[in-house]
């Protein structure tokens, strides 16, 4: 029996638990039953996959033989592959999705479910205005049957998924960014905070003693490059260079913990949203708009949120949710600010900082089967058009799991497709309920 697109019952109540800010918890066992299983001569598990051509358009007409699915590294048989199509959105895109005789068509039935999630803490008041305008444009191009929810996190406006798009638009107008830039006495950039913390961590791990020579702290030459650069920039001419270096280290440590707390709060809020979505049946697309989340790209560096990656990916699998993360990267403009020029920022430092700010957005989206779209100009209008194009259709695969897979645990999932010049998007985790 082939999988089909399910209808969303209007009686379902979706609660966005944004008031719970903490570590992402494990869902109760009864929620695991939301993973679709289709009865046939064998039990089939639904795996949703996007296959896109070079322009980002969904690629139709692929049979089950074109797909290769592995669970925990073991290949599983793909029994069916249904191409679920939606009517074109109101965005001027050509309608290339004419239904075939055997293809399920969502148009005329229940629409898609989108959650617009705006990272308030990453945007200033001015930046948030452009983001809200872009989100309103995205909303205007959806189908009337599409349900839309709204989340402004870590704490802000929320609305349950609804087809009342006008109500969502009105609530969007109330959203204002809450970004609070950290103050650094020594003009430390995010990359310098990460590097100095990583150097201090490496010193502590190696149990290297700190000595004194000429009144200055002595650090291992191969581990103190960043600190020395900051020392030359900020401590030159001071009466007590040793005290200045210690103050730089103390400030880097404090700011590292501060940023780590902010990132953890945002990721925990998203985890709470995913847990709330787990009780809402059917496929969901979460559109995250964020200016980025700082995260260390070096061992021992701070902010360090490595442990939350898998938790977010598993929560997305349980919720049957795909994340599209738009990184509204304003760093390229800020690089030319007077403050950055005074601080002596180098282009390489700025590019690395931009990559760090988008790192967790990228990982989070990829784990859920979505992608991160980097926005260098504007507030994401073009990237939102791309989201509409990519979510116009998807494949629903009927996969036969192995007996060892049926334990109610989240397992690693990989999907490949034999189609030239194509891109495959599938979540990295799947949950198969016990028999």
Image (tube, helix red, strand yellow):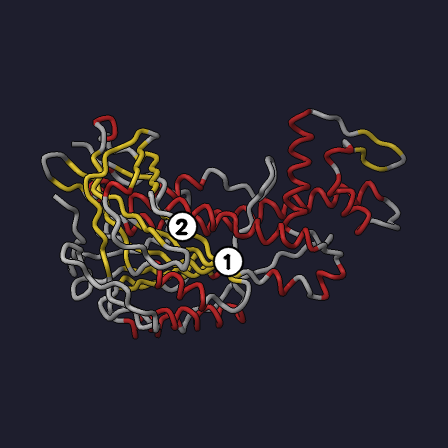
Hey, which quadrant is residue 426 in on the image? top left
Q: Nearer the viewer, residue 162 or 421?
A: 421
- Image coordinates of residue 101 in percent, x first then y, are 14, 57
- Image coordinates of residue 206 in percent, x first then y, are 68, 25
Hey, which quadrant is residue 248 in on the image? top right
Q: Which residue, given by chain and number where applicable, does mark 2 sit on?
A: 421
Image quarter (top left, top right, bottom left or bottom right) of the C terminus: top left
Q: Residue at x 23, y 59 (%)?
A: 85
- Asked if labels 1 and 2 touch by Cβ distance under 8 angstroms, the answer is no
Q: Which residue, given by chain and number where applicable, does mark 1 sit on?
A: 374
Q: Residue at x 45, y 60 (%)?
A: 289
Image quarter (top left, top right, bottom left or bottom right) of the N terminus: top left
Relative height, residue 67 to residue 132 (above, below)? above
Viewer-nearest of discs 2 and 1 = 2
Q: Residue at x 50, y 58 (%)?
A: 374
Q: CA distance from mark 2 to mark 1?
A: 22 Å
- Image coordinates of residue 430 in percent, x first then y, are 30, 39
Relative height, residue 106 to residue 37 (above, below)? below
Q: Residue at x 35, y 56 (%)?
A: 286
Q: Which mark is residue 142?
A: none
């Amino acid at each position: 029996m082939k999988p089909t697109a399910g209808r969303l019952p209007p009686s379902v109540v979706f609660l966005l638990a944004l008031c719970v800010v903490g570590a992402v918890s494990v869902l109760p066992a009864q929620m695991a039953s939301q993973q679709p299983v289709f009865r046939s001569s064998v039990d089939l598990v639904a795996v949703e996959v996007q296959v896109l051509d070079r322009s980002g358009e969904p690629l139709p007409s692929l049979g089950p033989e074109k797909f290769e699915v592995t669970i925990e590294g073991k290949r599983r048989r793909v029994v069916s592959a249904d191409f679920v199509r939606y009517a074109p959105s109101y965005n001027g895109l050509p309608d290339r999705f004419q239904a075939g005789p055997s293809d399920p068509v969502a148009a005329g039935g229940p629409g898609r479910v989108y959650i617009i999630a705006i990272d308030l803490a990453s945007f200033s008041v001015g930046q948030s205005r452009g983001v809200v305008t872009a989100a309103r444009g995205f909303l205007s191009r959806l189908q009337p049957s599409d349900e839309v929810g709204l989340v402004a996190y870590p704490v802000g406006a929320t609305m349950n998924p609804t087809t009342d798009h006008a109500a969502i638009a009105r609530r969007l107008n109330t959203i204002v960014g809450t970004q609070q830039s950290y103050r650094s006495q020594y003009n430390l950039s995010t990359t310098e905070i990460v590097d100095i913390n990583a150097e201090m961590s490496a010193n502590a791990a190696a149990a290297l003693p700190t000595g004194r020579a000429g009144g200055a702290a002595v650090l291992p030459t191969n581990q103190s490059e960043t600190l020395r650069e900051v020392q030359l920039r900020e401590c030159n001419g001071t009466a007590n260079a040793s005290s200045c270096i210690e103050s730089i280290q103390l400030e880097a440590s404090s700011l590292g913990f501060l940023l780590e707390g902010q990132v953890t709060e945002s990721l925990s809020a998203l985890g709470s949203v995913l847990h709330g979505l787990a009780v809402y049946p059917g496929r969901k697309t979460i559109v995250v708009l964020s200016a980025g989340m700082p995260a260390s790209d070096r061992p021992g560096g701070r902010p360090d949120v490595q442990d939350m990656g898998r938790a977010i990916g598993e929560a997305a699998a349980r919720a049957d949710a795909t994340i599209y993360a738009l990184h509204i990267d304003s760093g390229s403009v800020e690089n030319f600010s007077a403050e950055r020029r005074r601080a002596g920022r180098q282009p390489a430092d700025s590019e690395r900082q931009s990559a760090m700010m988008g790192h967790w957005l990228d990982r989070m989206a990829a784990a859920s089967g979505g992608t991160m779209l980097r926005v260098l100009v504007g507030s994401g209008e073009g990237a939102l058009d791309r989201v509409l194009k990519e979510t116009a259709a998807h494949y629903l695969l009927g996969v036969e799991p192995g007996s060892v897979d049926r334990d109610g645990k989240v397992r690693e999932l990989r999907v490949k497709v034999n189609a030239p010049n194509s891109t495959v998007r599938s979540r990295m985790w799947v949950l198969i309920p016990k028999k």
